[in-house]
Amino acid sequence: GQNIDQPTEMTATEGAIVQINCTYQTSGFNGLFWYQQHAGEAPTFLSYNVLDGLEEKGRFSSFLSRSKGYSYLLLKELQMKDSASYLCASEGDSNYQLIWGAGTKLIIKP
Amino acid sequence: DAGVTQSPTHLIKTRGQQVTLRCSPKSGHDTVSWYQQALGQGPQFIFQYYEEEERQRGNFPDRFSGHQFPNYSSELNVNALLLGDSALYLCASSSVSRDYGYTFGSGTRLTVV
C-alpha cells in the first residue's frame, strides 16, 4: 500500500528552529515535495527532493533519505507568518499523481 | 505571469445536482491535475489531464469526470452530488520539467446541502 505519515501538530517559538518529519511508503518513488498551506488557501510549493541529501532555500531546508523512506522540513528563524499546515507529498511510480500526508499544523508562539 | 486560476471561488449546490469547476493552468504548463481536499486532510488525487486526455485517475467514482481543452484549461464535472462531495477542489498545473513542482490554484470551495 501507499502511506505517508507526518505529525498532526507541532508548536514552536518565534525565532526558533523546528523540524517536521515525514515517512513514506509508496509504490516506486519519483520525488518528495513539501508544501505550505494556510487555512482556507491553496498549497504553496516549498521544495522538491529526488536525490538523497539536504536542499537549502533561505530559511527553509528539506532533507531526503530514500533508503529510509524519510524526509524532513527544517524551518529556521521562525516567524509568526510561518503558522500554517505543512504537507509532505510523494510522487510514486505512476509519475502522474502526488500521494499526500494529512499535513502537520505548525503553531508559532511569541 | 498569471498563476493557476480557478473558478468559481465558492459554490453551494443541492444534493443530486451537477457542478462544473474550471481551471486555467499557469503559463507554460501543459498538464492539469485535480485534487479533492476535505477539511483537515491532505489532498486526494482525482485525475490528471495531458494532451486533452485523462492520463491517470485516482479512486473516485465515475460521477467525477473531466475535460482538457486545446489551450490546456480544464474542467471538472461532478454529477449527482452527495453531501460527502463537500470539499475544497484544487487544480494543479505542471510541465514536464517540473522545475517548480506543481502549482496550485486557490481552489473552489464546494458545499453540498
Image (cartoon, helix red, strand yellow):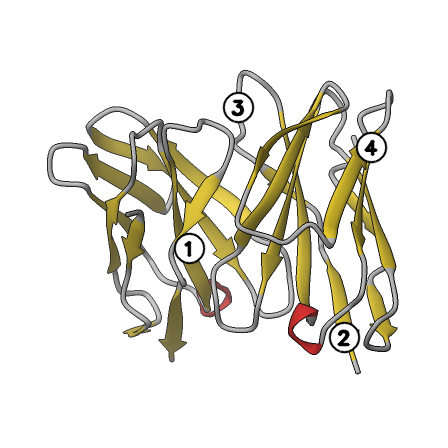
Residue B17 locus on image (x, y percent): 88, 68
Q: Which residue is mark 3?
A: B98
Gap in angstroms between the C-alphas marked 3 and 2: 32 Å
Judge left or right: residue B98 versus residue B53. left
Q: Which residue is mark 4?
A: B73
Residue B26 locus on image (x, y percent): 74, 31
Q: Is residue A59 above or below residue B89?
A: above
If you read the primary sequence from the N terminus, does the residue marked by circle 2 or circle 4 appear first?
4
Gap in angstroms between the C-alphas marked 1 and 2: 24 Å
Element on which disc 3 rests: loop
Q: Residues within 10 Å of mark 4 (few under 14, many from 20)?
A: many
If you read the primary sequence from the N terminus, does the residue marked by circle 3 or circle 2 appear first?
3
Q: Which residue is mark 1?
A: A87
Gap in angstroms between the C-alphas marked 3 and 4: 18 Å
- Assess whether mark 4 and mark 2 are in contact (beta carbons under 8 angstroms): no
Gap in angstroms between the C-alphas marked 2 and 4: 23 Å
Tag 2, which chain?
B
Q: Which residue is mark 2?
A: B111
Residue drawn 48% across and 67% down? B41
Q: Quadrant of residue A65?
A: top left
- Going by the numbered disc 3, the residue's amino acid type is Arg
Element on which disc 4 rests: loop
